[in-house]
Image (cartoon, rainbow, N blue to C red):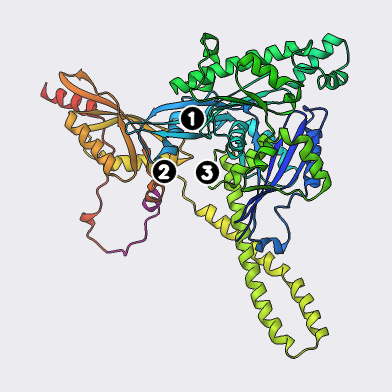
Amino acid sequence: MAKKRVVAIDIGTYTAKMVQLEQSSSALRLTNAAVVTYADKDDKQQVAESIRHLWASLGGPSQKGNLLSLFSRNESKVVLALPRSLVSTKRLANLPPATDDQLENIVTIAAESELPFRVEEAIFTYHDVRRTSDATSVELISTRRESVTSYLDFVEQIGVSASAVTPSMIAIAKTAADSGCTKPTFVVDIGASQTDFCFIESGVLRFSRSFRLGGDNLSEHISQALNVDTETAAEEKRQIPADEAPTSTWTAQLVGELQRSIAAATAHRASDSFSAAEEAEEIDSVESLTLPEAETELWLCGGGARVPGLAAALEEALDIPTASWNPLRAVEQQSDIKIEPQRAEVNAILEEWGDTLAVPLGVGFGALDATLQPSLLPKEAVETLTQTTRQRQILATAGLGVLIVGGILFGGYTLQRSQKHRTEMVDARLASYTQPVAVAQAQLGRELALTEMLAHNVSPLDILHALSEMFRDRTQVAWTNFNIINLHEPETARITFNLEGASHNAINTLLGALNRSGVFTNVRPGDTTTITQNRKQIFQVQVRCNLTASAVRAFAKKRYPMPQPQIDEPAGDAELQLEPPTSTLELENEETEKDE
């Protein structure tokens, strides 16, 4: 059976971590790991160079490879983590009931008014879908596009393309679930500058937030309190217990943030309607802390959790069973997950950094999971990755054909030649493989270019023409304005126009025609209003609709009809050309003038 391999990358404030996982039919294995540190987190060139060294030390497989790599059945992916501090979440409740195929379009429409960023600047996805007979709700996950692209740039500089971008809280929840988290659990991952707080219940992420308190804050506090430099303070914080001065001040700040986070998680669990941003605003209004009825635990991980006695201090302050959590060792205890490092230096890395690997492990587990994990990878990157995969498949097919033909010729030739001649023929055949591959690449480029040229792009004229065919009798119904949004993506395009009708029946007839057209869908009329002009009632309504999945093909057929046999007809039977009719109001004005 083919093996699946994944390299998960977590780029932190001062460290970048990579783990390499391999899944076969028998087990899931951690085959390699590496960690690299850098001094200046704001120096992008320094961070990129550090990641390059990390990739080299890990022995990451090249995605380009040689000709033989095209025929490998072992799938290899590179996935990337995105910090929780760069992510915004919000529960979208009371969405209409929908299937999985319909839900993506519904969330896309609903998200436009809920995103904390401009739509063109945002990337969003959703997870935690909950359905009732009357409604559907999801948790919307969004971030700024520039935040994702800045992280993607780091891995692109080492010559690879990420196949997914996973928010860190999703990764932490995945690692906790795979390491045997059965009770309601608060996971606190304390990093250098940020701390991620996650509430996990029944193996599902129920709540998360990030707050600006970490190891850097402790170092700065010790530096000021003891009047030492930052490097000395970083060493001292590993020796001073959490309940002793000056570390106790930082511990009190951490306890305060955890109390606010636990209160928010409890309120969210009770109402199941707040967004993460709303919960953060409501934290201060929570007067009491009501934990779930089942026994609740608190797990500490990350470099900032290494403060001596921190778990005991938090347990006493919060009255919650608290323990230091090493996700690597917790995962190792599961029967279906094996830790198999190949080198002594890898063992040393796992021993030193195992408690900081919750995020990269979860990112890797999610990439190997059969269920679809939420990803913030931009759509254009997904399309590029799909196209690259298709090209590799075509090249593999072409190369395989060349190998088969060469093998047949070589087999017949070996019957008549000596071993020396056979060896020379093998060398000649291998050298000749370059040309067929180049020909296949050129042919693929031409076909892709031709496909792109022939792709039909919907224009406003296509939509106007389709609507005009339904507005033939302008004495009964006419439109007064017309607006299209997001036409460059027909699946999400929104069409708005106003109607004027002589009666409700005329408007309803037209709306029925729109629903039956096969081109327009999700037709949503607004409230009907009535005005009086020239002693007659005129009914007005605003209509919104979208395009169906088959609209592009229908427009293409309309714009480029198949040629029909020409039949000579009398000149009198020629098609009558009519000027576009005026609106209903103008027609009624003309009739009134005639009556007078």
Residue at image point 76% right, 35% down: 353
Question: Residue at point 23% right, 27% down?
Answer: 586
Tell me the magenta residue range.
Answer: 555-567
Q: Residue 305: within the magenta?
A: no
Q: Main secondary structure of the magenta part?
A: loop
Circle on res. 48: none
Asked whether, in this view, residue 164 is left or right of residue 354, the answer is left
Q: Which residue is mark 3?
A: 372
Depth-wise, is mark 2 or mark 3 nearer the camera? 3
Q: Which mark is residue 139?
A: 1
- Which residue, given by chain and number where applicable, does mark 2 sit on? 101
Residue visible at 69% across and 64% down in the picture: 438
| Kind of residue at badge 2 | Asp
The image position of residue 384, as x and y in percent, is 60, 48
Q: Quadrant of residue 334?
A: top right
Mark 3, other Cα within 10 Å: few <14 / some 14–19 / many ≥20: few
Residue 479 visible in the current orientation: yes
Give x and y (percent) for residue 431. Answer: 77, 71
Quarter of the image containing the C terminus?
Answer: top left
Q: Earlier in the sequence, mark 1 or mark 3?
A: 1
Residue depicted at x 31% and y 46%:
518
Q: Is residue 561 magenta?
A: yes
